[in-house]
Amino acid sequence: MTRELYNVRLVPAEDAPTPLTDEEEQRAQNTFFHELGSVIADRGWVRFPAYSREERRRLVAVAHRLSAHWGREVRVEAEDHCALVLFLPGHGPQAPAVRPVADGEA
């Protein structure tokens, strides 16, 4: 069976802009602005996956928009190679307490 594919776009290589139109990009940023902004307003921080350079750029832009909107700085830090944390100063995910290991403990 043969199928014809219409409106197929080539996906650019890694580190190239995503194949979103300007309207799609604006809608994505607006959604992140409202959804992530609500979580940050409730608990002071949010962790969100960002697997590509474009996704990280998008989240940093959202953090700048939130900072301008609230008049308070929203910081962005990379948690690891596939997640960013957006947070208000003085808030953020607390790292688990590390207890020193005593001699003889395993």
Image (cartoon, rainbow, N blue to C red):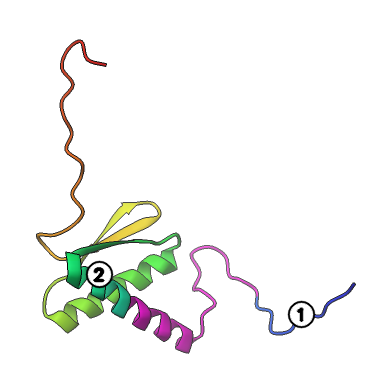
Give the residue at the far front of this rendering.
42
- What residue is rendered at 11% in x and 75% in y? 72
Q: Position of residue 71 (x, y in %)?
A: 11, 80
Q: Earlier in the sequence, mark 1 or mark 2?
A: 1
Q: CA distance from mark 1 to mark 2?
A: 40 Å
Amino acid type, callout 2: Val
Front-most of 58 and 49? 49
Amino acid type, callout 1: Leu
- For the C terminus, the image quarter is top left
Q: Please check the rendered image and state whether residue 21 is part of the magenta-colored stretch, yes or no.
A: yes
| Residue 12 visible in the picture | yes
Q: Position of residue 29 (x, y in %)?
A: 37, 80
Secondary element at tag 2: helix
Left or right of 39 on screen, residue 49: right
Q: Position of residue 65 (x, y in %)?
A: 24, 80
Q: Position of residue 14 (x, y in %)?
A: 53, 62
- For the N terminus, the image quarter is bottom right
Mark 2 lies on residue: 39
Q: Which mark is residue 75?
A: none
Q: Which contiguous range is marked in magenta?
A: 10-32
- What residue is rendered at 69% in x and 79% in y? 8
Q: Quadrant of residue 63?
A: bottom left
- What residue is rendered at 46% in x and 87% in y? 22
Mark 1 lies on residue: 5
In the rendered view, tell whether residue 101 sits above or below residue 18: above
- Circles 1 and 2 in contact, beta carbons < 8 Å: no
In the rendered view, tell whether residue 53 sits above or below residue 7: above
Q: Badge 2 local density, few (<14 within 10 Å), some, or many (20+)?
A: some
